[in-house]
Image (cartoon, rainbow, N blue to C red):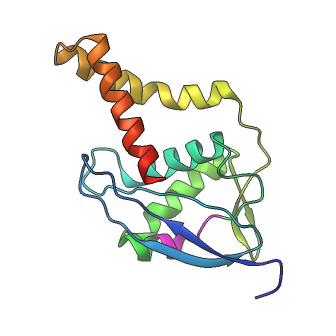
Amino acid sequence: MSSNQYLTRFQFLPLKDSFKNISCFVYYYSNTLIHMNFDIAPSAPTPIYRQIVEQVRRLIASGQLRPGDELPSVRAVALQHAINPMTVSKAYSLLENDGILTRLRGVGMVIAEIKARKEDKLALLRPALHTATQIVRQLELSDEEAHAVLQSCLDEWNKHE
C-alpha cells in the first residue's frame, strides 16, 4: 500500500423497520478515502439493481461521493451481499450509460465529473415523499402527525451517525 492509498471500509447498515436487510462490510484499497453506506434489502419490492442505482445517485447528490471516487468492484459487492454479479453489473452499467460512472481501465468504476445541484437532491427525495404522502392519506393521519413521524425518523437516523 503506497502512502496515498487508504484502507476504505464501506459500511452497509440495516434499516430497522423495513424489509429484512443484509449487513456487511467491504474492505479495499483506493487512492481516495471515502465513506459510503449501502443498504440492500433483497425482499424489498424494488429490484436490487435499482436499489444500488438509487443509492449511488443519492450519495453523489449529497456530496458523499465525489468525482474520481472509486466504487467497490462488482465481485466485491456481489460476494458481500450474496447476490448475482450480473445484478451489480447491471446497476453499474445503467449508471455508466447515464454518465454518472466512468470505467477506467485497471481501476474499475469511478464517479464521473458531474456537479450535484440542490434541485437534483430534491428530485431524488420527491418519489419517496410522494409514497409516504400516499400512505399518510390512506391512514388518514393529520399533517402534524406525519411531520412528527418524519422528525422522529430523522432523529433516530442522527443517533446512528
Is residue 120 positioned above or below 161 on the image?
above
Q: Residue furthest right?
A: 3
Is residue 98 positioned above or below 143 on the image?
below
Q: Residue drawn at (30%, 28%), measured in percent from left and top?
A: 149
Q: Residue drawn at (54%, 67%), measured in percent from left and top?
A: 10
The answer to whether residue 73 is magenta is yes
The answer to whether residue 142 is magenta is no
Q: Is residue 107 left or right of residue 58?
A: right
Q: Residue drawn at (63%, 41%), measured in percent from left and top?
A: 62
Q: Is residue 139 left or right of residue 101?
A: left
| Image quarter of residue 104 | bottom right
Instruction: State which quarter of the image contains the N terminus.
Output: bottom right
Is residue 72 positioned above or below 29 on the image?
above
Residue 15: image location, x then y, percent: 33, 51
Residue 156: image location, x then y, percent: 37, 43
153 or 99: which is nearer to us? 153
Q: Residue drawn at (24%, 57%), measured in percent from left and top?
A: 20
Q: Residue furthest bottom?
A: 1
Is residue 136 positioned above or below 116 on the image?
above
Q: Which residues are the magenta region? A: 71-77
Residue 60: image location, x then y, percent: 65, 45
| Image quarter of residue 29 | bottom right
115 or 1: which is nearer to us? 1
Residue 126: image location, x then y, percent: 47, 24
26 or 84: which is nearer to us? 26
Numbered label tally: 0
Q: Residue furthest left?
A: 139
82 or 13: which is nearer to us? 13
Q: Is residue 66 left or right of residue 2?
A: left
